Each structure stands twice: as C-alpha cells, then as structure tokens.
Image (spheres, grey):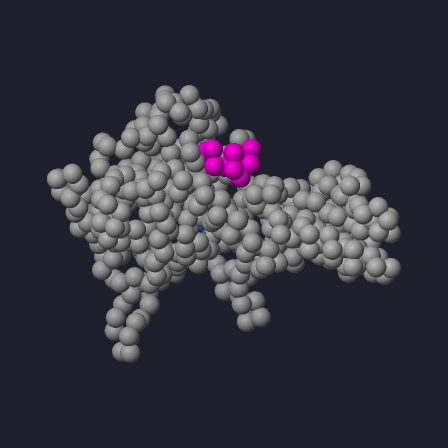
Amino acid sequence: MKSDDILNIATKRGFFFPSGEIYGAKAGFWTYGHLGTIMKHKFENLWRDYFLKLSDNYFEIEDVNILSEDVFKNSGHLKHFSDPLEDEKGNVKQFNMMLEVKVGVTGDEKMYLRPETAQSPYISFKREFMALREKLPMGLAVIGKAFRNEINPRQGFFRLREFTQAELQIFFKEDEFDVNFDEVKNYKLKVMDKDVKCSSLKIPKFYAYHLVKIQQFYLDVLKISKEKFRFRELDKDERAFYNKIHYDIELDMDSLGGFKEVGGLHYRTDYDTKNHKVLVNCNGKNIYPHVLELSFGVDRNIWALMDIFYRKEKERELFLFNKNVAPVEVAVFPLVNKDKIPEKAEEAYNLIKKDFNVFYDCKGSIGKMYRRMDEIGCIAMLTIDHNSLKNNDVTLRDRDSMKQIRV
Ligand code: GAP
C-alpha cells in the first residue's frame, strides 16, 4: 500500500515518526525528524512569502497555545466544537474535542489548548488595529500549533491530536473589501471536476479572488498538477458553525483513497468579532469587522506533498520534490575514501553549501548512496573521482532521469 511505502521511508529516513515511540506512542502525536523539519519550515516560509504579500496590511503574530475558558465560551467552541460519540449502550453523546488544562497551584483555573489558531487574531485585533493605524482590510496570520482531542486519530499522520495550522484572518468592513478582480476574472477555478470561470461563480468578488490566489499557490508555487487539486463547496449542513461561505481545498492522495481536505476558505462574517465584542471605530462609525479566513493544515499539506511526489520504480523509490520543498537539494559524494578524493569532495561541499541544502555522504557504495538520496527527494548528486582531481570537475547525476554528465 502506498501509505505504508511513504510511512516506511518517512520513519526510516527522518521525515517523521510516532512521538515517544520508545514508551509506546500515543495515536495522533508525531515527531518531525531532521528532514521533515526542514520541509515543514520550507512550506511555512512559502506560505508566509505568498499570502502575507497579498497586501501591505497583512502581518504575522505569535500567541500562546493555552487560552482562558472565556475565549472559548464566547467563540462558541465550548458549546459547538464536538463530535458525536456512541457509548457501549448505543447512546450517542456529543463529545467536546478541546483539551483542558488546569492552571495555578490549586488547579482550579480551567484553560484550554487552542483548537484553532484563529482565536488569537480575534482577541488581539483591537491592539493591532490601533498599532497599524486603524486601516481595513487588515490581516493577521498565525502559524502555530492547534490541539484537538480527536476521537479516532486514524489515518496515521493525517488526523492528529496536536498539529500545525497556518491561518490568515482578514478583517474588513462589510461590503468594503476591494480586490483587483480584473486580474483574476477570467481565471479558471477547479471546482470539483470542472473548470469554472472565476467571474461566473455566484459568490462575492473578494471571496472568488482568494479562491484564485489559493489555487495559484498550489499550482504555481507548490507545483501540484491541476488534476490533483480541487475546491469543494460545503453546504449548510456540512459547514462549521461559524461559516457563511465555505470551500474546502482538497488534494488527491492515493494513499488516502482520493481527494482529502488540506485547508479551506471561510467567510466567517462578524460572528467572531461580535462574540468577542470587538467593536472598533472605523472612519467615524462603530463596526464589528467581518472576517475572511484562509486556513491550512501544515501537516496535512506535508503528507500531501509526500503522497503526490512519491514514485515507485522497478529498482528504486523516490520523491520528485522540486527545490521549493525538497529538504535536501544537493548531495556530494567522494567515489572512494582515499587518494585525496574526500578532501576534494569536501572542497566542493563547502563551496555549494552557502547556496543550497547540501548533504555529504561517504559511507557505502555509490549505488546505495544514490538510492538513499532518491528516497529523500534530493535533486542533484555530485560525485568526485580521480578525474575530478585532474580536471577540477564532478559527475552530476539527475535524480529523475538518473542521467549523469561531467561538469
Ligand atoms: N480556523 C478554522 C479551522 O480550524 P478546520 O476545518 O477545523 O477549520 C482547518 O481546520 C484545517 O486544519 C483543516 O483543513 C486541516 O488541514 C487542519 N486540521 C484540522 N483538524 C486536523 C487534525 N486533527 N489533524 C491534522 N490537521 C487538521
């Protein structure tokens, strides 16, 4: 099975593995190893670079993970954030998925691990609005941990109890969110299995514009093919309790049996600002700002990249990662460990490590070293041999074609 193949490489090579394995890992908690951590940071940086640059008035903030009970009373999570759970007698009860923390010496003070990063921008909004000269639209992003006591954290890495979200909350005055719609109106959005012209969707312009920006992120930045990407609109019964318009972002993953959600675009209206009583004065009028939320599960996207770029060939397994996401971009090998070849290889390594993520390996046969690098999606491999000493050149092997040239 493909998911087993991916998990096998992920755990063996240091992408990710169950947390606390030596004590019997608990389901839904995973550790990122040295490769997975680089890949995760790369994804987060791509996300930052892309979405925060959509406007001069979008910024990132960082908040604590533990928030007071009042936050979740007012956000609606204490009441609504639950899944149905059947007990032994067959009765169905609502099970709240938030994780509780007891704070203070007596442990009397009840707080919660945040189930979404979104609440932090809402409760920080007033301060940032003042600091940023009271301009709307204004965006506040958080890339950080979220926690959910998932009843059934199956599907290995995909349904986690502790995970990372990258979310951008854009605050705006209702009916006053201007976007450059001309730029995107002819763009073809992939909605389920159809290409739909952006301007033909019966949704507000600001919403359609952000669907385009999200699709472009997946296709142009992450280089995911259009066949593997789609939006799915959720109807009233499927939507989260706070959403008025909700499209999920879905990627097609063989390992999970088809299209699965990795994020969403949520029009939350003034639901959150009203509930937190975030009333602000905007151009002489008191308003509750409306919120458009761009929400992404970082770990699900990492799994999706592993799934989509994985290939199994007759003699090898590999990931066809591009430079944007590959944890290791170049590898350097001395062909043999003698005759001043390792010294020359180190010279090459020191020269290129300033510009690339480089891995140096001198343990084992060249064939095995190549296979190991294929398995972590390393793009280019340089080998130094006796001729390199004479000609000051290397053998360059391309991962995808396995072709070798001297340069
Ligand atoms: N702030 C909105 C929000 O949290 P959500 O649909 O509940 O909306 C957003 O979650 C994203 O977070 C999902 O699309 C998914 O990528 C990720 N996510 C949610 N629950 C998850 C879990 N148990 N494990 C991993 N990722 C999860």
What residue sits 74% from the left and 37% below the top? 401
Q: Is residue 162 left or right of residue 203?
A: right
Image spot of residue 229 (x, y percent): 50, 34
Query: What secondary structure is the stretch in magenta mostly built from?
Result: helix
**Magenta-colored stretch includes residue 222:** yes
Residue that extends furthest to the bottom in the rendered view of this protein = 105
Q: Nearer the viewer, residue 137 or 207?
A: 137
Q: How many marks?
A: 0
In the rendered image, is residue 5 in sight? no
Q: Is residue 399 left or right of residue 114?
A: right
Please state the horizontal and vertical placement of residue 33, each as a whole percent of the image.
58, 59
Query: Percent from the top left, x then y, of residue 1?
Result: 64, 47
Q: Report the residue at 73% width, 41% height from top.
A: 398
In the depicted structure, whether residue 353 falls above or below residue 102: above
Please say if 161 is above or below 208: below
Which of the pair 256/76 is nearer the observer? 76
Task: Report if residue 210 lies within the magenta region.
Answer: no
Is 373 placed above or below 173 here? below
Q: In the image, is residue 110 above or below residue 190?
A: below
Residue drawn at (41%, 48%), measured in percent from left and top?
166
Residue 127 visible in image: yes
Q: Quadrant of the C terminus?
A: top right
Q: Residue at x 73, y 52 (%)?
A: 348
Left or right, 319 with respect to 346, comes to: left
> Residue 192 appears at what percent x and percent y?
45, 30
Left or right placement of residue 193 versus residue 69 in this view: right
Quadrant in the picture for residue 149: bottom left
Write down the region rendered in magenta. 215-225
